[in-house]
Image: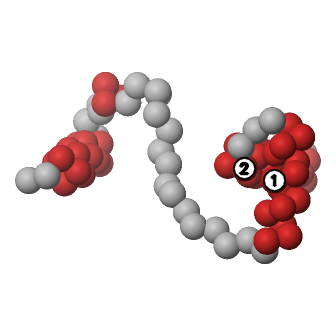
């Protein structure tokens, strides 16, 4: 069994234990956030504009995209909370 498959089996076992109502909090340290790699096609002009902004700010394209998404999601969350109030 390879290392990746072993890790997947361990995760599945923890999930089964959690679904059974066991306390599995010791498996979570809070140090890591779940991540998923995505592939995103953007127009070249759009990427050039992002790269100009990245250069101005001194950050990577990936960091800028994450920051822009975070800002937008916070705006949406604030708007949704305002509707509820």
Residue 37 visible to an observer of this rendering: yes
The residue under label 1 is 51
Residue 7 versus residue 26: which sits nearer the camera? 7
Residue 82 versus residue 76: which sits nearer the camera? 76
Q: Is residue 22 above or below residue 69?
A: above
> In the image, is 29 to the left or to the right of 7?
right
Q: Secondary structure at mark 1?
A: helix
**How is the protein colored in the picture?**
secondary structure
3D distance between C-alphas at marks 2 and 1:
6 Å
Residue drawn at 76 percent across, 38 percent down: 59
Residue drawn at 46 percent across, 33 percent down: 32
Q: Residue furthest left?
A: 1
Q: Position of residue 10 (x, y in %)?
A: 20, 44
Residue 84 bears which disc, if any? Answer: none
Query: In terms of image quadrants, where is residue 74?
Result: top right
Q: Position of residue 11 (x, y in %)?
A: 26, 46
Whichever of callouts 2 and 1 sits on the residue coming sooner in the sequence is 1
Residue 61 bears which disc, if any? Answer: 2
Residue drawn at 19 percent across, 54 percent down: 5
> In the image, is 36 to the left or to the right of 45?
left
> In the image, is 33 to the left or to the right of 80?
left
Q: Are marks 2 and 1 in contact (CB under 8 Å)?
A: yes
Residue 34 versus residue 78: which sits nearer the camera? 34
Specify the quadrant that holds the C terminus.
top right
Q: Secondary structure at mark 2?
A: helix
Residue drawn at 57 percent across, 67 percent down: 39
Residue 70 visible to an observer of this rendering: no
- Structural crowding at the residue carrying mark 1, measured as other residues with C-alpha within 10 Å and reported as few (<14), some (14–19) or many (≥20): some
Q: Position of residue 9 (x, y in %)?
A: 18, 51
Q: Position of residue 22 (x, y in %)?
A: 25, 36
- Structural crowding at the residue carrying mark 2, measured as other residues with C-alpha within 10 Å and reported as few (<14), some (14–19) or many (≥20): some
């Amino acid at each position: 069994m390879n290392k990746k498959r072993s890790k997947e089996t361990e995760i599945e076992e923890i999930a089964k234990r959690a679904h059974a109502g066991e306390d599995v909090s010791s498996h979570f340290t809070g140090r890591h956030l779940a991540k998923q790699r995505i592939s995103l096609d953007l127009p070249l002009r759009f990427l050039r504009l992002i790269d100009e902004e990245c250069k101005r700010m001194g950050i990577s394209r990936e960091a800028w995209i994450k920051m822009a998404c975070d800002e937008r999601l916070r705006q949406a969350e604030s708007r949704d909370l305002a509707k509820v109030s």
